[in-house]
Image (tube, rainbow, N blue to C red):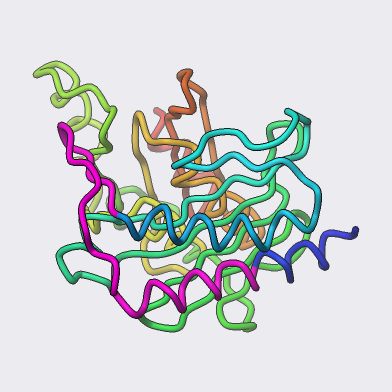
């Protein structure tokens, strides 16, 4: 099955899950531990996506159920509801469905459905990034003092005084810093120029896997360093110059 056909299937899955989530009929909290919250809607959305993607025969890594199928170099990565707290609180503008296909630890394609606003972001490796079927590109911002950074405090990051101080020192150089509560949306906004950079330490792979594919297709620069247990340090930039300034 070629990548364009797989993209169509992923879009179908993301749209079906988004249609379900738009109704906001399953807001019951299944668990709330530490800084994390799980809703019934997370698992119900996941089951919709799995039902569609299973037709491809490709294994699936999911936020709620773990790894489904025999482990392979090519696998789907899904976050059925990114921004669960936003969704629960009625901030649905900052919640989405995220589906990615990875192969050999590299993003192949990504789909993000910002369902409350009917925005579908897509991207294919060595192809184009699209928002509702219109080509998108990064902002092209090169200088850190002119750039807007999106970031957040993921559930499993380092919350020690030293860890938070290091975080502050990393992001304070930017012109503005924004926290929206959805890693997938903050990251994919780099692809369309709504922000110029995105960075989170300790973020889960399924939160950002789709966005990384879309940003690369939009001409941006991405870095994803594994920390173990599907946690990553992820940084995304509109240009290589901006990435160099951040890492200097």
Q: Is residue 44 above or below residue 71?
A: below
Say which residue appears at 59% left-offset and 63% top-offset.
111
Say which residue appears at 38% left-offset and 35% top-offset.
203
Q: Quick check: is 54 in the magenta stretch?
A: no
Q: Is residue 76 above or below residue 5?
A: above
Q: Which quadrant of the figure has residue 154?
A: top left
Provide residue 43's location: percent of width, then percent of height. 42, 53
In this rendered view, identify the residue nearer to me: 52 or 164: 52
Q: Is residue 95 above or below residue 208?
A: below
Provide residue 208's location: percent of width, then percent of height. 48, 46
Q: Which quadrant of the figure has residue 219?
A: bottom right
Quadrant including the C terminus? top left
Q: Is residue 36 visible?
A: yes
Say which residue appears at 47% left-offset and 51% top-offset.
79
Q: Which quadrant of the figure has residue 4?
A: bottom right
Q: Which residues are magenta?
A: 11-39
Q: Is residue 63 left or right of residue 222?
A: left
Quadrant including the N terminus? bottom right
């Amino acid at each position: 099955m070629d990548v364009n056909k797989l993209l169509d299937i992923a879009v179908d899955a993301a749209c079906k899950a988004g249609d379900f989530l738009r109704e906001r009929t399953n807001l019951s909290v299944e668990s709330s531990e530490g800084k994390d919250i799980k809703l019934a809607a997370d698992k119900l959305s996941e089951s919709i996506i799995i039902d569609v993607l299973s037709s491809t025969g490709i294994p699936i890594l999911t936020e709620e159920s773990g790894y489904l199928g025999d482990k392979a170099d090519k696998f789907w990565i899904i976050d059925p509801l990114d921004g669960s707290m936003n969704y629960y609180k009625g901030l649905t503008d900052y919640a989405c469905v995220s589906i990615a296909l990875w192969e050999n630890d590299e993003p192949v394609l990504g789909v993000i459905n910002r369902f409350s606003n009917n925005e579908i972001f897509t991207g294919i490796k060595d192809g184009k990034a699209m928002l509702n079927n219109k080509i998108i590109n990064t902002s092209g911002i090169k200088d850190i003092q002119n750039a807007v950074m999106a970031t957040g405090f993921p559930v499993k990051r380092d919350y020690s005084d030293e860890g938070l101080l290091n975080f502050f020192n990393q992001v304070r150089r930017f012109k503005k810093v924004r926290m929206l509560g959805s890693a997938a949306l903050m990251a994919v906004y780099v692809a369309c120029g709504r922000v110029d950079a995105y960075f989170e330490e300790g973020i889960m792979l399924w939160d950002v896997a789709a966005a990384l594919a879309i940003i690369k297709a939009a001409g941006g620069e991405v870095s994803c360093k594994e920390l173990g247990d599907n946690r990553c340090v992820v940084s995304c930039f509109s240009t290589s110059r901006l990435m160099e300034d951040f890492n200097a």
